[in-house]
Amino acid sequence: MSHIFPRNCKIALPQVAHGDGVYLFDTEGKRYLDGSGGAAVSCLGHSDPDVSAAIKAQLDRVAFAHTGFFTSQPAEALADKLVAHAPEGLDRVYLVSGGSEAVEAALKLARQYFIETGQPERHRVIARRQSYHGNTLGALATGGNMWRREPFAPLMIETSHIAPCYAYRDQQKGETAWDYGQRVANELEAEICRLGPENVMAFVAEPVVGATAGAVPPVEGYFKRIREICDHHGVLLILDEIMCGMGRTGTLFACEQDGISPDIITIAKGLGAGYQPVGAMLCTGHIYDAIEQGSGFFQHGHTYVGHPTAAAAALAVLTRLTDGGLVARAQEMGEKLDTALRAAFGQHPHVGDIRGRGLFRGLELVEDRETKRPFPRERAVHKTVKRAAFEAGLICYPMGGTIDGQRGDHILLAPPFILTDTQTDELVTKLSTALGATL
Ligand code: PMP
């Protein structure tokens, strides 16, 4: 009997034995193409020598020193490099161990900022339906995925959820993409006014929606309008780039492509590329200064914040992404993957939408392409596709997203940026086999 407490008690999983580039191997010797980098984590593949060497070197110097006593060279260097490449104004970095932790830190920082600046009534968070921001209680309360929230709702802070920016489903006939974007962004203004701007702390959104909807990018102009609304009402804009950041969409930060800068941004997953559990929250100097000039103390912290070995790994990852040209490669290979997906599934009767940016691509599966009617929920098509793909030696990340109570099936693809042309073909062929066996 295994003593591990698995996520799904009813399914026995194979044991992973080793990784090589974009492939994982189980103990039976079966090879899997990691078409989703796990959950958009492994952006460098599974055998990056630079990152391994950086971790080993740091372990030989010092594995850990508590940030209550010391800062460290890798943590300082990582923060410098992140700031050098971050969207304008984000110039302070708080290092954590993962995505949910980064979101919790962002929420608490926003709250403390308003206390320090004499606006203690600002505490309400607005986010979007069909969103996921993590599994800890604050992050879970922020997310708008009802299936994930429901069992834990009594434990959560009250959050408002407005419409997501989801053109495939919600752009109306005769409405331009621009007008649609402005219309849904304006829901934020309406909600701020309903709650009273003096009560609203932050708006939280993922620039390109990952796990709940399969790589849905915003329409042009949407985030510019969101930024305007936040500025107008003094509400902090928190962007969650835990999944879509770190080069995944073809730019280091996804929001670069929307021409805006948030007040706070959260990153994780690709930052450690799976080599270490690490995340970060970046904030503007304006927010940091308010705390420095106020209490001088961010009232938050976990044992492993600023972990030196995790920071050394993240620094090596970031160096590979920026100096090593891998962000540009994510853009180039992303376009090739998009072309290949459209060639293979563009006319597929059950593929309603193919979308995304860079190496962050999604397919929405529908029962009827014309009406966009989703498959019945009970069929759990996404789970069957995942199993069939795994069988065929492909790891992809399927999701049954909740769209205003209506459930749809998505497949998220987020392969490592080192993906080659041949491996792109292999990915699409295996996905085709999985869809063929399922639908
Ligand atoms: N935000 C987003 C957008 C995510 O995709 C995730 C993880 N899927 C998280 C937050 C939570 O990150 P973690 O699982 O590392 O806590």
Image (tube, rainbow, N blue to C red):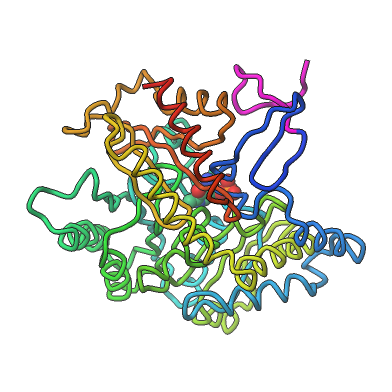
Q: Main secondary structure of the magenta part?
A: loop
Q: How many marks?
A: 0
Q: Is residue 4 magenta?
A: yes
The structure residue drawn at horizontal position 71% and vertical position 34%, both measured from the top left corner, is 25
Left or right, residue 360 beside residue 84: left
Residue 100 higher or lower than 403, as above or below = below
Task: Decide if residue 176 is on the left or right side of residue 1.
Answer: left
Quadrant in the picture for residue 2: top right
Q: Position of residue 278 (x, y in %)?
A: 67, 56
Tell me what residue is drawn at x 32 percent, y 31 percent: 407
Q: Is residue 138 visible?
A: no
Tell me: residue 376, above or below residue 201.
above
Q: Quadrant of the N terminus?
A: top right
Query: Residue 241, percent across and down?
Result: 49, 59
| Residue occupying the far left of the picture | 174
- Magenta region, residue range: 1-16
Residue 333 located within the stretch drawn in magenta: no
Location of residue 218 in the rendering, given as x and y in whole percent from the top left corner? 31, 58
Q: Which quadrant would the C terminus be assigned to in this image?
A: top left
Task: Specify whether residue 227 is in view.
Answer: yes
Q: Residue at x 27, y 49 (%)?
A: 166
Residue that appears at 48% across and 71% down: 115
